[in-house]
Image (cartoon, rainbow, N blue to C red):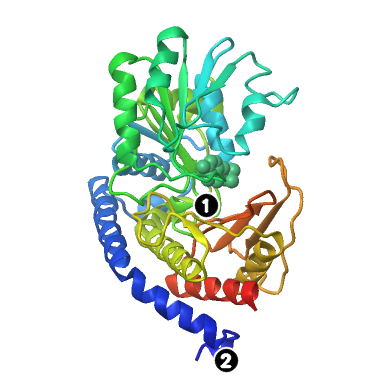
């Protein structure tokens, strides 16, 4: 049946071997999805979610029942005091930027402790003359990961002893880096240690791509942020971001998003509440589909002799699969093959080009219902040695699997 759809015998054989190898992983992934589904449903039940919550507000958006209920549900799912879940966040970067600006004041110090933050945050933190944190007099420093890709807690504690630090940034996912992704449990343990000695340091987690992959979230953090066109939107939310955490900090972020004095009270939802709720309802399953796709990708690429991070046998903590391709042409071919299996723009051919916020040229394969949605099947790569491909998403495992098969076909064909 595959041959009719442009898949060669060789790729079919490799896929069969891969599927055999990853069976035990699939059982684990399904168990986590089931657990997180119960967690989400329990929060819906507790807050008596009903059709009335689908009603949207307009204008100022005062007294929006649905919006308040959605935020209460999010806080419960994360195990935090409060939440800000809004369509007025234009992207993950905007959400994280708002969280940083919400907390930091001139002469404060921001310390990144999982190495350099995600590429698009570099301008937010230290851009020149564009209204960055640096332009407002916020100081910045970072502590690289240790040789085992763990947070260098000794160095962090030492830094905190000797410097006044307002806020710490931890990135859960590897992003465009070659390291393992941190489990929520690990992040919680690091934050606990920091708070034991330095209770007033605001610990912030960039949670992008990590949501609902583990059984827990990094709830020890004072603030957590992420995008709704990644995991928690369940593939159907067309825009938005979330910030969860301690009430007093979420409030400060809300003052930054809307205006001092207004905060969470305003922000019309128009017609989006139903999608926010249905997206969260679907998210545990959709995330499991994306993880299965990632594991399948790792297994197939390993069959072909490539190094995958994480390996196909490893337990996941985010939905990203990276593979060291080592060759620009093959990397481009992989992306072009994946694009050809997309539901939208399958006829388009992606090429590397410059992107706002990224230092290197980037190639992005994405044929998504929502532009830039990376819970949908997508692959991207900064064009730099050693040519690592980052693939993520897949709303259904069937479509994700086909996408990987087409990518490999294009790469080796
Ligand atoms: C995607 C991502 C971001 C930024 O989100 P955008 O929606 O692309 O702006 C930030 N941090 C990490 C780790 C991400 O994966």
Q: In which image quadrant can residue 60 be found?
A: top right
Residue 41 visible in the displayed image: yes
> Compared with residue 272, is residue 182 higher up or lower down, i.e. above or below?
above
Residue 131: horizontal and vertical position, in percent? 69, 23
- Give the residue at x 42% y 58%: 311
Residue 276: horizontal and vertical position, in percent? 44, 51
306 or 144, nearer to the observer: 306
215 or 407, nearer to the observer: 407
Q: Is residue 267 left or right of residue 154?
A: right
- Give the residue at x 26% y 49%: 48
Give the residue pinned by disc 2. Answer: 4
Q: Circle 1: is it few (<14), some (14-19), or many (20+) Cα within 10 Å?
A: many
Residue 401: horizontal and vertical position, in percent? 48, 73
- Give the residue at x 44% y 67%: 299
- Secondary structure state at the residue bearing disc 1: loop
Ligand 1 near label 1 (Cβ, under 8 Å)?
A: yes
Separation (CA) of disc 1 from disc 2: 33 Å
Q: Is residue 315 left or right of residue 370?
A: left
- Give the residue at x 44% y 38%: 149
Residue 399: horizontal and vertical position, in percent? 49, 73
Does label 1 or label 2 sit earlier along the sequence? 2
Q: How many marks?
A: 2
């Amino acid at each position: 049946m595959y041959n009719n759809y442009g898949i060669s015998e060789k790729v079919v054989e490799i896929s069969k071997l891969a599927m055999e190898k990853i069976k035990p992983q699939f059982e684990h992934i399904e168990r986590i999805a089931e657990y997180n589904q119960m967690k989400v449903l329990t929060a819906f039940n507790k807050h008596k979610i009903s059709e009335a919550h689908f009603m949207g507000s307009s204008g100022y958006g005062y007294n929006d029942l649905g919006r308040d209920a959605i935020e209460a549900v999010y806080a419960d799912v994360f195990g935090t005091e409060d939440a800000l879940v809004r369509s007025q966040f234009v992207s993950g970067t905007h959400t994280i930027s708002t969280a940083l600006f919400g907390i930091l004041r001139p002469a404060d110090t921001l310390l990144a402790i999982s190495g350099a933050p995600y590429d698009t945050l570099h301008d937010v933190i230290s851009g020149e003359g564009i209204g960055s944190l640096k332009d407002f007099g916020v100081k910045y420093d970072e502590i690289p990961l240790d040789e085992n890709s763990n947070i260098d807690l000794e160095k962090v504690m030492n830094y905190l002893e000797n410097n006044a630090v307002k806020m710490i940034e931890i990135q859960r996912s590897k992003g465009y880096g070659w390291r393992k992704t941190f489990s929520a449990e690990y992040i919680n343990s690091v934050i606990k240690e920091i708070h034991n000695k330095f209770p007033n340091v605001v610990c912030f987690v960039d949670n992008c791509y990590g949501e609902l992959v583990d059984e827990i979230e990094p709830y020890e953090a004072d603030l957590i942020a992420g995008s709704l066109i990644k995991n928690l939107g369940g593939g159907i939310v067309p825009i938005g971001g979330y910030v969860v955490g301690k009430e007093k900090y979420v409030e400060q972020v809300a003052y930054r998003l809307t205006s001092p004095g207004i905060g969470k009270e305003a922000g019309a939802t128009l017609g989006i509440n139903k999608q926010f709720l249905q997206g969260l309802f679907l998210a545990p399953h959709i995330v499991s589909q994306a993880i299965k796709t990632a594991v399948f990708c790792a297994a197939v690429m390993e069959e072909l002799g490539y190094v995958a991070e994480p390996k196909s046998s490893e337990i996941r903590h985010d939905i990203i699969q990276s593979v060291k391709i080592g060759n620009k042409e093959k990397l481009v071919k992989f992306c072009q093959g994946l694009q050809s299996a997309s539901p939208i723009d399958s006829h388009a051919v992606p090429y590397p080009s410059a992107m706002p916020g990224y230092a290197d040229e980037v190639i992005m394969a994405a044929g998504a219902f929502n532009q830039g949605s990376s819970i949908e099947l997508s692959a991207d790569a900064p064009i730099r040695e050693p040519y690592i491909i980052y693939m993520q998403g897949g709303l259904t495992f069937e479509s994700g699997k086909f996408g990987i098969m087409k990518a490999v076909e294009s790469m080796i064909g």
